[in-house]
Amino acid sequence: LFFTMAPATDKMETDTDSKKDMTSKDYYFDSYSHFGIHEEMLKDEVRTSQYRRAIEHNRQNIEGKVVLDIGCGTGILSLFCAQVGAKAVYAIDCSEIADYAKLIVKENKYDHVITVIKGKVEEITLPVDKVDVIVSEWMGYFLFYESMLDTVIYSRDKWLKPGGVMLPDYLTLNLVGIEDAEYKNEKLNFWDNVYGFSMKCIKDVAIQEPLVDVVEAQQVCTDVRLLRECKVPEYSVEDCTFTCPFELTAKRNDYIHALVAYFDTFFTTGHKPTKFSTGPEHQQTHWKQTVFYLDHEITICEGEKLTGTLACKPNATNRRDLDITITYEHNGKWQQTKGSMEYKMR
């Protein structure tokens, strides 16, 4: 690794001041300026290969057509579209990576097809009135956290032709219960006794932060319940605020320490439908899973049910952040309990 010093103190102070002035929304775009996050996404074999496959299966919808790529990053999806014969591709990204996307497109000799536009979708002007296809990898953790869904909806309503194609076009948010005593003791119950001192005030805050991590398939002790459907061609900004009931049935005698959410992504418009899952029983992706620890351990027997609701809404200050409330109730052979938990994805 090689490091260089800033040429002048004034430059360093200017950079520091600009960072101080950044809001959480600015940090979202700034984070996507760094190469590491793009490397992680490109090396996500499930994500990248399934998008490529979906684009290839939609050749009849893309060849000779105009495509809009929202949040293009390095431009990989735009390149896939150009490969299958798109007439023109407009690739938009607000972060500094757009400058490199332009170089990548030129290096691969697709600059006669792909036009990279740097800026916010809501502020730019396209050289065309309408597009035939919108492609975007907009999903975030828990599907909706830090996602670009609002931007995709805006683009759809402004530029997509009637009957136009959206990739992906259908997603589901799913929920399971898991046994995770070891991790909960290590990361949360640790604060109950730290060298003989109680630090429960930190535990109370820590449990409100959902954990994004890999969940092992053997930890899952309930069936899967579909929480929310997202039909992208008709989804609205208002639909991003929702409350969903759930009923999980235990597959074996076990303990539930947390609820885990993950999403499945479908491309249904092509010659052959394509999908991928971010669930624990599938090949892992950079999205991993989202873990919501409960305040109490639930003792559950095979066939018994855990019921409740999950309510989600964008944070009032920053819509890319989420406020989530989970209520739960269990009336089993060995335990009867209910509760309510507030979570903040920041």
Image (tube, rainbow, N blue to C red):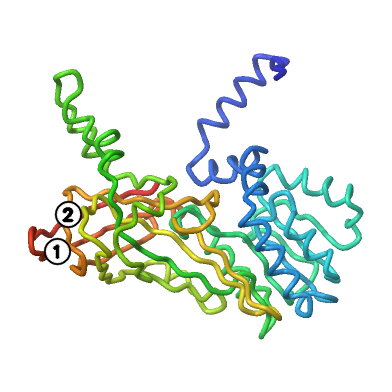
Q: Position of residue 230 (x, y in %)?
A: 48, 72
Residue 296 - label: none
> In the structure shown, which secondary structural element does the residue marked by tag 1 occupy?
strand
Q: Position of residue 279 (x, y in %)?
A: 46, 59
Q: Is residue 247 left or right of residue 56?
A: left
Q: CA distance from mark 1 to mark 2?
A: 8 Å
Q: Looking at the picture, tell me which residue is in the foreground, 249 or 116.
A: 249
Q: Residues within 10 Å of mark 2 (few under 14, many from 20)?
A: many
Q: Which residue is mark 2?
A: 298
Label 1 with label 2: CB-CB less than 8 Å: yes
The quarter of the picture where residue 139 lies is: bottom right
Q: Residue at x 67, y 66 (%)?
A: 135
Q: Is residue 51 left or right of residue 262?
A: right
Q: Residue at x 23, y 54 (%)?
A: 256
The quarter of the picture where residue 63 lies is: bottom right
Q: Residues within 10 Å of mark 1 (few under 14, many from 20)?
A: some
Location of the N terminus by quadrant is top right
User: In the rendered view, would you say 25 is above or below 148?
Assistant: above
Q: Looking at the picture, tell me which residue is in the foreground, 124 or 93.
A: 93
Q: Amino acid at mark 2?
A: Ile
Q: Which residue is mark 1?
A: 330
Location of the C terminus by quadrant is top left
User: Which of disc 2 and disc 1 is earlier in sequence?
Assistant: 2
Which residue reaches farthest bottom?
A: 163
Q: Position of residue 150 (x, y in %)?
A: 52, 64
* Number of marks in the rendered image: 2
Q: Amino acid at mark 1?
A: His
